[in-house]
Image (cartoon, rainbow, N blue to C red):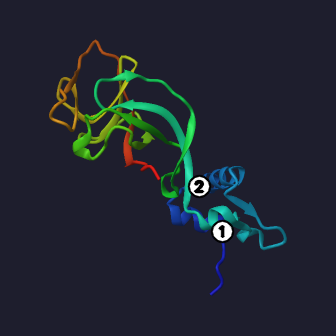
Amino acid sequence: MQNEAPTYDEIMIGLGFKSLGTVNWYVKTLEEQGHLYRTKGSNGKRALTLTQEHATHPEACLPLLGLIAAGEPIEALETPNSITVPSSLVHPDNFVLQVRGQSMIDEHIQDGDYIVVKKTASARSGQIVVAIINDEATLKCYVPKSNHVELHPRNPEFPIITIKETDKFHINGVLLYSFREYPS
C-alpha cells in the first residue's frame, strides 16, 4: 500500500472540522512554519508532504510567554520565546508558561515546570486555570461558588484565594499538559 497525503476533505473529516477554510488555514500555517511543502508535478489533491525534519521528529514549538505563579499571584508579564512540545499540543490557542512556586505540587506541578495552556475565558469547576486577579497571574484549581469564586491550591501549606466582588478577575486559560526538563 502506497503512503499518500490526505486530501483537504479527508483532513476535514479526520479532524472533525466543519469547513475546508479551516483546513486551508492550518495547511498554509504549517507551510509558512516549514512543516509542510507542496510537491510539484504531483496530483494537486495529494500534493502535501512533511519536511524531512518534521517527518522524523514528532515535536513542534509553542510560544513560551513567561512565568506563572504557583503560590502568591505575580505580575502578569509576557516574555515571548518558544519551547518544544509534543506536536499534538500545537494549536493557535495554546501557549506555554513556566511555573514559579510550590502551590500545585499535589498535582505534580513543581517550581520550574512548564505548562501548556489553552487560551479560554471559561472553565469547568475543578479545572486548573491561569487566573488573573487585579493584573496578577496565578495557577490554581477553579471552584465557582454561588456568590463568589475560589481558587484552590494543591498544597495544604497554601491558602485558598477567595475572589471578592471588588477584584478584577478573569480566566486566561486552562491547563492541558505539564512537563519538566532535566539537566543532561
Dots 1, 2 in contact, CB < 8 A: no
Which residue is at 80% across, 73% downward? 42
Q: Position of residue 61 (x, y in %)?
A: 56, 48
Q: Can residue 168 be seen by looking at this rendering? A: yes
Residue occupied by mark 1: 7
Q: Position of residue 84 (x, y in %)?
A: 53, 50
Please indicate whether residue 30 sits to the left or right of residue 106 in the image: right
Please indicate whether residue 68 sits to the left or right of residue 63 in the image: left
Which residue is at 26% across, 38% downward? 104
Residue occupied by mark 2: 19
Q: Marks 1 and 2, how far apart in space?
A: 13 Å
Residue in front for this viewpoint, 167 or 24: 167
Residue in front for this viewpoint, 117 or 81: 81
Amino acid type of the residue tagged 1 in the rendering? Thr
Give the mark nearest the N terminus, 1 or 2. 1
Picture quadrant where residue 175 is located: top left
